[in-house]
Amino acid sequence: MLMIKRYPNRKYYNTRDKCYITLEQLAKHINNGEEIQVIDFASGEDLTSLTLSQIILELEKNKIGSLPRNILANIIRFTAESTPLKGILSFSDDNSEALDEEIKKRILFLENVQVIDEEEAAKIEKSLIEDYHSLTSTKKDELTQKIEEALLMRTIPTRTQLAQIKKKLEHLAQEVENIVNQQV
């Protein structure tokens, strides 16, 4: 894992290569398959999510990367406090239609952000809907745990993490607006 320290002057320091690094260079490391971790030099706070958000913002701003709007919109919409499929299993048996719709919605999200493909989405959706209705309460708890473990293995961010990203993006947007206003 590539360890990066962010200094108060907003410069990033590559601890492995012992040099300063730009967001664009960090993006290249990520594109090469490297895992990164960004730590605030002063506080030790993990700034990896914020930095990844900044990289996305820079790529979009410079038209280097172009994420589909639906993916960006879904990331912003998906800001509650649980994993993408958490809560599905809290539906009661007499509310199976709402459960089916919720499963479809969550699976579509995973497909839209390209975590799973269309074929895999259809299989998972069918399996969840069919299996859920035959589960006991104990089995539902076990399924919830398995779903959460699968999401963690795929490094899908939790709703809490996405909420933090959204908050940091809003803060970045405000900072950019302040800079623009100062230049005018």
Image: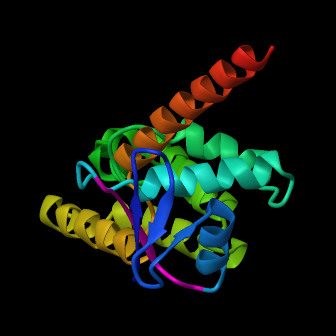
- Residue in the foreground of this view, choosing between 27 and 7: 7
Asked whether the viewer can see residue 117, the reply is yes
For the magenta stretch, what is the residue range?
33-41
Tell me the quadrant of the picture where the N terminus can be found: bottom left
- Residue in the foreground of this view, choosing between 102 and 117: 117
What is the x, y in percent for residue 8?
A: 40, 45
Using residue 178 as the reference point, say whether residue 90 is left or right of it: left
What is the x, y in percent for residue 146?
A: 28, 73
Tell me which residue sits at (57%, 48%) in the image: 105
Tell me which residue sits at (27%, 68%) in the image: 143
**Which quarter of the picture shows residue 85?**
bottom left
What is the x, y in percent for residue 47?
A: 39, 53
Tell me which residue sits at (19%, 69%) in the image: 142
Q: Is residue 1 above or below residue 92?
A: below
**Which quarter of the picture shows residue 101?**
top right
Asked whether the viewer can see residue 71, the reply is no
